[in-house]
Amino acid sequence: MASPSAGPAELGFVEAAPSWRLRSEQFPSKVGGRPAWLSAAGLPGPPELACPLCGRPMAFLLQVYAPLPGRADAFHRCLFLFCCRTPPCCCGLRVFRNQLPRRNDFYSYEPPSEDPPSETGESVYLQLKSGAHLCRVCGCSGPKRCSRCHKAHYCSKEHQSLDWRLGHKQACAQTDNLGNTVPDHNFLFPEFEIVIETEDEIMPEVVERDNESEIIGGMGEAHEEDLESMAKHESKEDKIFQKFKTKISLEPEQILRYGRGIAPLWISGKNIPQEKDIPDCPCGAKRLFEFQVMPQLLNYLKADRLGRSIDWGVLAVFTCAESCELGIGYAEEFVWKQDITDAA
Ligand SMILES: [Zn+2]
Ligand SMILES: [Zn+2]
Ligand SMILES: [Zn+2]
Ligand SMILES: [Zn+2]
């Protein structure tokens, strides 16, 4: 059966970065913290960002800046992945796509400066250029506000009460510098930049061949029929998991594999989606694989703070093959989770 090529993939690694580099106007790819929204209008609202499984607000997991060369309407393009992190849930997941032309209402036509801004403040942005307010806890659209001070905005009752307990109860009366007094709600994931490198395509082939000759070399005595029956016993699951391990062994720190239209690297033979499992975009176009999040990312998310709420083997994101026009809004795309427990 013909399948797309397995590469080359772009690999993503996490790196510490100063907070200014992770702001919207720098068009970052990043993990954790608050989303660096692209378009400041048409943000997904609380209903869209509710966990599809338990209904509670999801946390921002990561975003990938992925413009489409040759597409004027996607000169800037970004994918935003959210996941539920409330134990005992569930790892509910949702992903959104947003894209903008080079000339737009929010950003300069010219690329952003690579120098740090002169102001050094680390204050959290809780209002967008469009005027929209963001939730103080999660950094997502915050249509509700505190009825006392009218200055603190929230996505949900749940986040309002979290902020109230962790300091807004006191701060509510002194609202002069509310933006500088955002407490640690223990809700956001730790923040990192994602840096991208192209995977070396030659090495995995060499390693695979080495493994093969090792196996054959070790069986000098075996008859041909024996070898054949052994090969039959090697399950498809083992092969897929072996391929996964071999492929990542060269860059074991990779947290992301990006490649629009390439084949995903599954961790197991179980629970691989069929074509019919990937819903078409509402525009009518098929969805293509675009990137996957690797289990290595879990090591950076302070799992001890998470309880046992989140876990995955592979999160594979599929997006509209046409990357259809959206105006200024955010379009929901599709994410498939393959559990690590599915692995052999
Ligand atoms: Zn949930
Ligand atoms: Zn919130
Ligand atoms: Zn208040
Ligand atoms: Zn579409």
Image (cartoon, rainbow, N blue to C red):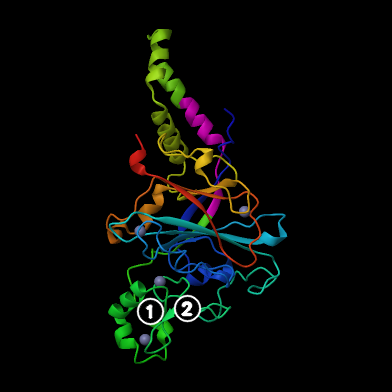
User: Can residue 32 be found in the magenta stretch?
Assistant: no
User: Can residue 198 be found in the magenta stretch?
Assistant: yes
Return the residue nearer the eye: 133 or 9. 133
Residue behind mark 1 = 182
Return the residue nearer the eye: 325 or 248. 325
Residue 243 spot, x, y in % from top left = 45, 33
Image quarter hosting the C terminus:
top left
Mark 1 falls on what kind of element?
loop
Q: Quadrant of residue 176?
A: bottom left
Residue behind mark 2 = 126
Secondary structure that dominates the magenta span = helix
Q: Amino acid at mark 2?
A: Leu
Residue 206 spot, x, y in % from top left = 52, 30
Residue at image coords 53%, 31%: 205
Q: Amino acid at mark 1?
A: Val
Q: Is residue 93 above or below residue 41?
A: above
Q: Is residue 119 above or below residue 42?
A: below
**Marks 2 and 1, Cα distance to the nearest angstrom?**
10 Å
User: Pointers 2 and 1 in contact (CB under 8 A)?
Assistant: yes
Q: Which residues are magenta?
A: 196-210
